Image (cartoon, rainbow, N blue to C red):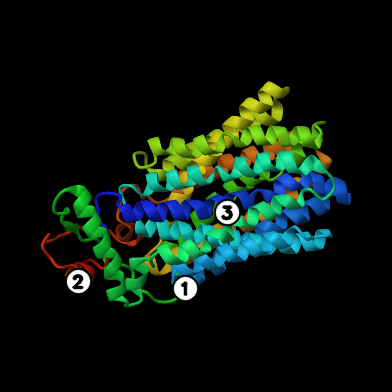
Amino acid sequence: MNRIPVVTRSHIKWAALLTTLLFFDMADLNALAYALPAIRAEWGLSLGEVGIATSATFLGMFCGSIIGGRLADRFGRKRVIIGATAFFSLFSMLTATATTVTELSIYRLLTGAGLQALVVVLLTYAAEMFPRQFRGRVQALMLGVSLLGVPALAFFSRWVVPLGTGSWRFVFIAGSAGVLVVILAWLWLPESPRWLEGKGRIEEAEKTVLLLEREAEAKWGGPLPEVDTVPAPIPASKPSDLIRQGLLRRTAVLAIGYGFGLIGYYGFNAWLPLLLTETGLTTAESLTYTSILSLAAVPGALIALLFIDKIERKWAVMMLFVGMGLFMLMFGFGSGAPMLLTSGLLITFLAFASTTCIYTYMPEIFPTHLRALGTGTANGIARLMAFGSTFILAAILGSLGFTAVMLFLAIAMILAGIVIGLLGERTNNRALEAISSLKSQEPTKVPANATATTRVGEERI
């Protein structure tokens, strides 16, 4: 897997399918934010009840991250990708039937669990399946295209929500459409060879490896590069290995840094329509602003194509997070439509550039047998921090107002950048096995004419 020097035809097909799944995930993730102003007006919700409904999604994400990661490490990446998509689509559809804030919160909790389980396992799968020198760019392209789901749902919401009482329900129905892609995922996606090798299923792993080698040789125009051996993978053992000294530090740094980042990002994104109504805008006007700001999502993710495989990822994350914090200060302390639109567009632009980098970075730092669980655990703890922050944000908004909320979010973003940048692991253009090794080891060569079976056995993929 490490010697594949090009993106093959199969890689392109898998990336297209994963992008489609992520499109619906991204759309559904933002569904509550777009429907919430109308729900609050229709049901007469207090800010506290709004906080409960919003936090339910984050609590579900916490559960889904850890459970989805554990299931993927035990039962395989492909099964969980398919199961998580079906799960979140079902409960998004049920959200459209909610009649009380309790029902709404329960359905969004379960939807959030499915959404985040899919993201964690999909990122793990992408990290394991694509060539290391293209990992960042492939994920940037996948995320950039899938983020079309955000403005698509934003403009759909802008059109459908003002139609009348209960029209917000169509927002959740639209978000559940990802279930339509499940059959293609079952037919087209192979299981990860790295995961199969860890389970001793070498023959199944070799089928995919040999397919990629044949396609790569045809595209490369000759024999593939020699195999670089890397430090032996950490032997598969128990989930408790995640708290061993080296991995515990990585998990803690990622969880805390990303947690501050999510407080800033989701505090801004999930609360934005409501925050804008607090400045005096109508629901329709706030949704118009939100729709315009969402247009920066796709170019923000795609701009990462220019640097994601060139600049060390942790430094890129740090600079983007700190930049977001500074523009949040402009958004909070500025006044007038031009300032709100300019700073809001820049926040959204940097947010999705940073999302591309952090999504690529997370699964890279864990060994194969703990990659999904490690990613899910760090992600889940970060979501739990975001869950707790919703109550703080509701209290700040209710007592101190809009500007104080933006100051709080800006501080969180700057702290996120400092933690990841100063304490994170170096991952750029390194083999996954070399990153996950807790001690340095010099690579050695394996003859280029070695058989596929020998390469799998000696390199451990």
- Which structural element holds mark 2? helix
Residue 252: give x, y in percent of width and height. 51, 58
Q: Locate the C terminus by quadrant.
A: bottom left
| Extreme residue in the right direction | 44
Q: Which badge, 1 or 2, comes first in the chain's sequence?
A: 1
Q: In which quadrant of the rendered image does the N terminus lie? A: bottom left
Percent x, y for residue 446? 14, 62
Q: Which mark is residue 25?
A: 3
Q: Residue at x 35, y 58 (%)?
A: 129
Q: Is residue 220 above or below residue 454?
A: above
Q: Is residue 31 above or below residue 375?
A: above
Instruction: Return the disc, 3 or 2, that comes first in the chain's sequence.
Output: 3
Q: Which residue is mark 1?
A: 239
Give how far apart the Cα atoms at labels 3 and 2 are: 38 Å
Q: What label does residue 453 carry, if any?
A: 2
Q: Residue at x 48, y 46 (%)?
A: 143
In front of the other: label 1 or label 3? 3
| Mark 1 vs mark 3, CA separation in Å | 27 Å
- The reply, left or right, for residue 129 in relation to residue 176 is left
Choose the circle earlier in sequence order: 1 or 3. Answer: 3
- Mark 3: few, some, or many residues within 10 Å (few <14, many ≥20)? many
Q: Position of residue 191 (x, y in %)?
A: 39, 67
